Image (tube, rainbow, N blue to C red):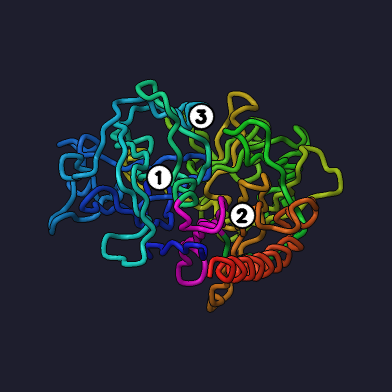
Amino acid sequence: PAPYVAAPTQQFDGNDGQWSTFAISVGTPGQSFRILPSTSGSETWIPVPQGCTSSDPDNCASLRGADPFNGRASSGFLTNQSSTWDEIGLYSLDLEANLNYTGNGLYGYDTVALGSPSDSSRLSVNHSVVAGIADKDYFLGIFGLGNRPLSFSSSANNSQGFLQLANDAREVPSLSFGYTAGAVYQNKQVPGSLVLGGYDSSRFTANDMSFSFASADAKALTVGVQSIIADNTLLGTASFTEGSGGFLAVVDSTVPYLFLPNQTCDTMANALGLTFDETTELYTINDTMHSKLKSLNPSFTFKLGNTAFDNGNSTNIQLPYAAFDLQASWPIYQNPTNYFPVRRSQNDTQYTIGRAFLQEAYLIVDYERTNFSISQAVFSDPMPPSQIVSIIEASLSNDDSSSSSSSLSGGAIAGIVIGAIAGVVLLALAGFLLFRRRR
């Protein structure tokens, strides 16, 4: 099968920034939602009517990503309107419990399709795990790209995520994906890119760096942040890791923030004129400082490797100030408030590189070869035409025994393509011989 290219909604949603969303439909008939990809989760979460109350804005459900259903505004996912809904029960939302995100979800199985109900090419799987969410900590729904099995106390069997189900049904070529979050501030608003079973090589500049999975499934996409340096700050060129050193962090698009060492946050606040809000625990920016930073336009360089210390094997990802120039709105703040998306951490297990970073980076994850890559995202004007590349399953690849060619580096891109062609030829030849033998 060919990779599946998810179509972005061409809308930018969110209450903690403007994020490129993707369309999914849940249930039979399909109820449509605008969601954000989650590189850590394996489930699909969508808002339910209980997530909006009489004291909330009239368009609360729409703000949370619910599209019209049956010709009228949707209040959220209506389980009683889906003939394929199979309820499991109420369970806690543990995905980001480590970051102190809380809440419960109404879990069940249902048909989930990546794409709107009117999209004839949408990718649909049956009996996929869905959670209806009311808590506003997760303002928009999420679509899990993870590959961790899911278990519930009411069932003796594990459940699989969407990607595994799609792969089992031979709807995608492998357990892999490519994703970049898009950027509302680039060109004339550049939407995100999501490919299941491959990646879009037109959206990034390839490098030779490959990252291995961490041993803990929940932290598989761990990178070493060896340094963070910015130029054109209030203090000129500033290193935000000089005193504290490098650290390990999980790449997780579920959250917009970068949870960093406290010393790093303090250094950033000093160099960028940020103010810490004790109530929301966000770093806000007043109007005067906001204008100053936009004028200075600092640039941030993240040096990433497989270790927290610089061992000579790394790659750099650069982000403009615009990637961090975000606004938080209701229900975080009653009025839109400028903020900088770094968060203080209680301990080193919370260090996280969130969605804001992936505006300027392209992430390719290969679960079968247990490695991933992070490359600089490309923003040309106009944007280049898509170049979709398959990642074939490891069992069909001739080169998985070689760590250099099975890793997702620049060299692996060519290796995957060549391996794919060879695999197709071999399969065709085997099929022909088998056909002749049966005849």
Q: Which mark is residue 392?
A: none
In this rendering, the answer to whether 276 lies above or below 78 is above
**Mark pair 1, 3: CA separation:** 17 Å
The span shown in magenta is 169-197
**Mark pair 3, 2: CA separation:** 33 Å
Q: Is residue 265 left or right of residue 38?
A: right
Amino acid type of the residue tagged 3 in the rendering: Leu
Q: In this view, does 340 lie to the left or right of 117?
A: right
Residue sitting at 23 percent across and 44 percent down?
Answer: 84
Magenta highlight on residue 172: yes
Amino acid type of the residue tagged 1 in the rendering: Ile
Residue sitting at 16 percent across and 53 percent down?
Answer: 73
Q: Is residue 378 left or right of residue 9?
A: right
Residue holding disc 2: 393
Q: Which mark is residue 142?
A: 1
Residue holding disc 3: 99
Q: Where is residue 314 in the image (x, y as percent from the top left)?
A: 79, 50
Q: Where is residue 397 in the image (x, y as percent from the top left)?
A: 69, 58
Within 10 Å of disc 1 (Cα), the crowding (few <14, some 14-19, many 20+) is: many
Inspect this view and state whether residue 11 appears: no
